[in-house]
Image (cartoon, rainbow, N blue to C red):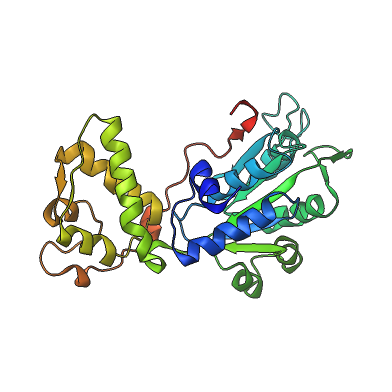
Amino acid sequence: MDREVFQEQYGLLGSSEAMRQVIDKIMQVAKTDITVTLQGESGVGKDVTARAIHAMSERSRNNLVIVNCGAIPEGIIESELFGHEKGAFTGAETSREGYFEKANNGTIFLDEIGDTPKNVQVKLLRVLENGEFFRVGSSKIQTTDVRVIAATNQNLWQMVQDGSFREDLYYRLDTVQIKLPPLRERSEDIIPIFRKFVEEYSARYDSVFKGFSDEARELLISYRWPGNIRELRNVAEQLVVLEKSQFIDKEKLQKYLKGRQHEGSADNLPMVAEDSYRKQKTDDTEGFDRKDR
């Protein structure tokens, strides 16, 4: 499969040199069982990348289980990951499989791995090293055969230095690291991706897209896009749905850019703090099986 077909099939957008290098690396590792860590800001497409790696792997006919480690309360994350036995804690009325069991023979995607508590990190290390773990409340060893993909928007090595992330787990996860670049570092991709989104939503909402002005084009490129691809998609949908206009100019576009200045040039637009775009996923896990596709 060549790069363009791969990108089209799995929704990995962009033709810049930075993205070509990323795609080539993804295609190299996808068919292996090697542990991969995806590093990048919120909204750059880490979950889409994880899906693509799983879909190209030998495990693609089995589940991809997605776990947002940052969305699970600290008090229950061990039980969620590794399961528990009946009576293990108050409210544990039945035994329950954890995500590692559900992902057996497939792939588990540990999103926001840096948010995992240290007491759970040591248990993750064991399952990564030999596929063994204990359910909460049990002394019986459980085994699982999974491929692990992790992701973070934090600097894990700095967290190791700060003492909040285990060094041994860091090295276990650092087998292959893929850094997904933010949109502002591949500005040549912004216009083609935005056009694709606008055309997609125009077709969905029975609208007609006739293009955008040079000033709107300049604004798209100069804006910092702190929410990256996710924000770009959201702005495209808002324009199509709320403006009901066939032609996008600077004034229409500017209304939907966060942190914009209502007056002044696009060059003066400030970068918005990325934290406002770190919305938790509605579901902290998702089964993904490509066998019916």
From where the camera sits, is residue 115 visible? no
**Which quadrant of the structure image shows residue 225?**
bottom left
Q: Residue at x 74, y 36 (%)?
A: 83
Q: Is residue 49 above or below residue 94?
A: below
From the top left corner, tell me how far across and down residue 150 is, in percent.
64, 54
Q: Residue at x 58, y 37 (%)?
A: 285
Question: Residue reaching furthest bottom?
Answer: 161
From the top left corner, tell me how far across and down residue 139 is, in percent.
88, 40
In depth, the one of 7 and 254 nearer the eye is 7
From where the camera sits, is residue 261 visible? yes
**Which quadrant of the structure image shows residue 94?**
top right
Q: Quadrant of the C terminus?
A: top right
Q: Is residue 68 above or below residue 157?
A: above
Q: Residue at x 30, y 31 (%)?
A: 204
In depth, the one of 261 and 22 nearer the eye is 22
From the top left corner, tell me how far across and down residue 134 is, in percent.
82, 42
Question: Residue reaching furthest right?
Answer: 140
